[in-house]
Image (cartoon, rainbow, N blue to C red):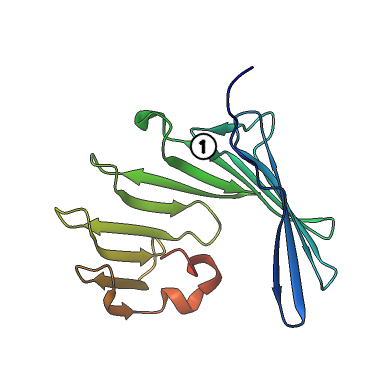
Amino acid sequence: DGEDTPPEIERITKRVPGYTETWEPEFGDEGDLTRLTMTRSTGDVLEETFGDQAHPVTNHIPLKLTRVLNGQTILDLVKTLDTHADSRRVASLASGSEEWVAAYDSLGNLINLGSNTAFEVEQTFAFSPARRLEQVHVQAPGRANQAFFAFDSEARMSSASNSGVLSECPERVEGLI
């Protein structure tokens, strides 16, 4: 057809003493990554699938991520996109019965991330006029325990206070802030 097509990565192998990992990606017709198989020298095989027929890749954002380790599904995450922003940002994330819903300010900054699970956790984000993250507040609605994190102008955490919300249910908030 005369058009140049970009080269595709067929295999990546990482080696360190005593360990090897080989990544084999697959791409869709639009050039988006659709599947990645990681074979480890330990014998583990991790497969990640990005999107499917019901949840396609939209604006280069995979709407579904499925992670399978040695034949067992360990993650089945579905995203919905915010139609008020031309479907360019995530509106919600769902895995099983757990769902996280996002809210944004008029500039597109994430200002709230809340969960509908049995142990609800809500995270509120505050930004400076220069759009730098200044503060994160984590609280379980209806409960007194909460945590505050403040950030300096270089987005480094400058202070933190925790009245127990993080120790009550750390697996729900670990890595989210």
Place of residue 21 in the rendered image (x, y in percent of width and height, measured from the top left): 74, 67
Frontmost residue, 81 versus 102: 81
> In the current view of this chain or complex, which residue is farthest to the front?
2
Which residue is disc 1 drawn over?
A: 60
Q: Report the amino acid beneath label 1.
A: His
Q: Position of residue 14 (x, y in %)?
A: 69, 68
For the residue pair 4 and 48, the one nearer the viewer reads as: 4
Q: Which residue lies furthest to the left in this view?
A: 129
Q: Residues within 10 Å of mark 1 (few under 14, many from 20)?
A: few
Q: In which quarter of the image is residue 104?
A: top left
Tell me: 151 left or right of 99. Answer: left
User: Does residue 168 sit above or below 173 in this rendering?
Assistant: below
Which x, y percent locates residue 15?
71, 73
Q: Reply above or below: 59 against 42.
A: above
Q: Name which residue lies at 69% across and 34% down.
A: 52
Residue at 60 percent of width and 29 percent of height: 30
Q: In which quarter of the image is the N terminus?
A: top right
